[in-house]
Image (cartoon, rainbow, N blue to C red):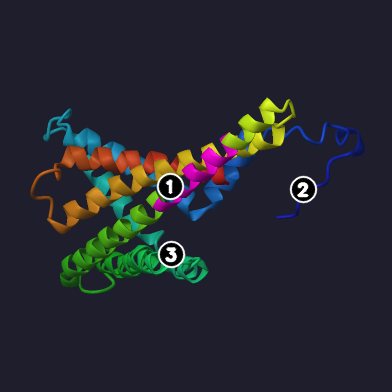
Amino acid sequence: MDPKPSPSPQNSNQTPNKPRQRDFLNHLEVYLAKRDGVDKLLKISRYATKIILASSLLPETLILTKRLKSFESSVGLSRKAFRLGKFVQDVNALRDSPFDTKQEIILSIIAYGGEGLYYFVEQFVWLAKSGLIDSKHSKSLGKVSAWAEFVGYIGSISLKFRDVKKLSEEEACLESSIEVTVTRGVGCQEEEKRLRKLREKKLMKKLSIMQDFADGLMALADIRDGRGRFSGPLLMSCAGLLSALISTHKNWVSC
């Protein structure tokens, strides 16, 4: 597609420091062009369907119930196709990680190594469920995938808690700096802007931790084959929907 023409001179006289509001449809186009954008919309539709099915709102004998089960299963298989080659992003993330301390090295290997292995194995799970390789391997591959995912979330949550701590320290220093500046009667618009961005980043990091906890809970349920406490279908469906909504919000903001 050819690039859009540059704005005409009469439209370029707008105030340069005032951000232009992005058109919703253009934003949506960019969002849907991303693999994660489509994947998370599928995730929302899947877990919303699972909540309806798990809540027993519809009778089992209803035709709509059977169709919803078929839809949920189909979407679940479709989502696995979006994980093809996704392990490469974890390899690159591990390569680019700042290894300042031994603890960061270990946590990064656990986080990115676990998630990367999960995405790698998920490719074969998809091939098994789609019929290209023998389906007898599906259960064992699924178990390896669930363990790798769970271990990855342990590392990821640990790293993000460290990030939140660092951001909180930066926030406290910046707040002190602003207080001193205000006391001296000097303008501090730039510092306040940085503080807002810092708080937004901190909020996104906290939401990401919530998402990891929800996904980790589902991975643990997969490891235990849905048995034990905190493994009920309705709870898992709610956790999946929460994770999908948070991820959708993060992807929407970032694109």
List x then y, in percent, for residue 232: 14, 42
Whether residue 136 appears in magenta in the rendering, the answer is: no
Residue topped by disc 3: 86
The span from disc 3 to disc 1 (Cα, nearest Å) is 29 Å
Q: Can you tell which of label 1 and label 2 is closer to the viewer?
A: 1
SS of the residue under disc 1: helix
- Which mark, residue 203? none
Question: Image quadrant of residue 132?
Answer: bottom left
Point out the stretch of residues depicted in magenta: 162-175
Visible in this render: residue 23?
no
The span from disc 2 to disc 3 (Cα, nearest Å) is 30 Å
Q: Is residue 249 left or right of residue 58?
A: right
The span from disc 1 to disc 2 (Cα, nearest Å) is 43 Å
Q: Amino acid at mark 2?
A: Lys
Question: Image quadrant of residue 82?
Answer: bottom left
Residue at 16%, 58% in the rendered image: 223
Mark nearer the N terminus (1 vs 2)? 2
